[in-house]
Image: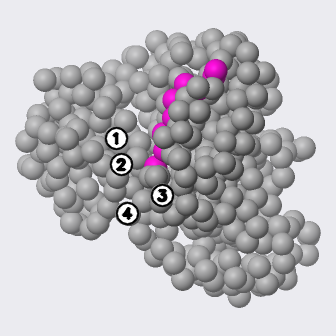
Amino acid sequence: MKGTILIIDPVLTGTKIAQEAKRRGFNTTAVIAWREIPSFAKNTFSRELYDEVLELEDADDLGELISSKVKSGKIRAVFPGTESAVELAERARALLGFKTNNPGSTQLRRNKYRMHMALRKSGLRIPAQIEASSFEEILGWIEKDSGNEISWPVVVKPLQSAGTDGLSFSSDLGELRRHAESILASRDMFGNPNTKILAQSFVPGTEYVVNTISSDGRHRITDFWRYTKRTVPGAGMIYDRQDLLPVSDCSRLGIQDYVFRALDSLEVRFGPAHSEVMMTGNGPVLIETASRIQGGINTELLDACTGTNQLSAAFDVALNESAFDGIRVNEAKLNSHACWINLICGESARVRKLSDFQEKIRALKSCFSLYVSVKEGQLIPKTIDLMSCPGVVFLMHDNPGQIEDDYLALRKLEKEHY
């Protein structure tokens, strides 16, 4: 074996990181920093992928753990398996003497309020916002808005979660109170209490995803997507689809320079980042950046369409910094078109004829892969966020028209089976 890859909070994307480590011939060590793995992620933890599994009861013991308890071999790289582990992963890299983002500024990359304030300090446009511990604080912020900077609906969400967890859109003060108080009375998807929330002015436009790799402050885009989301009455927005675009479109739209400036402002100097950007009539505005690999990444599809993928590039650069210059992406055009579709259950329903549903999806001409997280006969909830999404489908085809036809056919199939 070549050494060990350390994966902290090894769920969701952590599983794909472990698979990539094994494929490359490394040992794997999982570090679980939760007292209990969150319920939504339990079925994504694959114990068999790890040579050892260690529990970190106290974050202050991280140094002792990586220096004396890892027995599977010399640690070669450290990755966060999910958003909650970004801070610990940066600390672990620093303790090991690896090049990493400054652990002292991790909150710029984890706390969404501080993230946007860092952008403002750098002269980048951000939405009007407030970090609040009560609805009354948000109300005072709105009442003092003499410059009409706040536009409705007002967006509220947890400060340090991920996906669409807790994301809500409020069109009036009554809705805003309900949404704010609901989030503050709950825990985020990782089990942490929401003692404060972020409220922001709504940013209209078209949303894009920019996935990057950085090395010593240099940035390179690995893949570029356009989001389509749906509004859920009484809740927030859910993912509908993501369409893969040529990386050259990111520069053409004026998004690349903005994102690179944002990464500099957030002190992202090393490793992967996943940035969500709204393209408005006045230019790009960052929604948020996560210093990790994009969740749900389909490496095989990206390799086929662009020639590389963010996960593979992150490994290459973490193991050999000079590999950054060797990252090759087909920037001008895609080898094939692709679409990432989140399955949606419009109302709480019982799954019917699941095997027939899966067979029909796989028969679609552009179907590349399918994953469902539900079982036959299971009563599933209405989809209101990423955690209640019943599965994902990836489509890929040379003809974008075929992808559109299959997307519509898939949405029709959903209505027949749940």
Judged left or right of residue 252, residue 117 is left
In the rendered structure, which amino acid carries the disc numbered 4?
A: Pro
Task: State the residue in front, 190 or 329.
Answer: 190
Q: Amino acid at mark 3?
A: Gly
Label 4 sits on residue: 38
How would you rate the neighbour count of disc 3 (Cα within 10 Å): few for under 14, some for 14-19, many for 20 or more?
few
- Residue pointed to by mark 1: 15
State left or right for residue 143 relative to residue 211. right
Sequence-wise first label, 2 or 1 = 1
Task: Tell me residue 189's x, y (percent).
Answer: 47, 64
When the figure is inspected, residue 8 is found, relative to residue 317, above or below; the finding is: below
Which disc, if any, is residue 377? 3
Amino acid type, mark 1: Thr
Give the x, y percent position of residue 388.
55, 59
* Residue at x-position 72% and y-position 42%: 412
State the SS at label 4: loop
Whether residues under marks 2 and 1 lie with C-beta atoms below 8 angstroms apart, the answer is: yes
Which residue position is annotated with label 2? 44
Q: Residue at x 13, y 23 (%)?
A: 1
Left or right: where 194 falls relative to 177: left
Label 4 or label 2, whichever comes before in sequence order: 4
Q: Amino acid at mark 2?
A: Thr
Question: SS class of the residue under badge 2?
Answer: helix
Horizontally, residue 413 falls left or right of residue 143, namely left
Of the 4 image quadrants, the one containing the C terminus is bottom right
Q: Magenta residues?
A: 365-373
Q: Where in the figure is residue 340, as x and y percent of width and height?
A: 62, 35
Q: Earlier in the sequence, mark 2 or mark 3?
A: 2
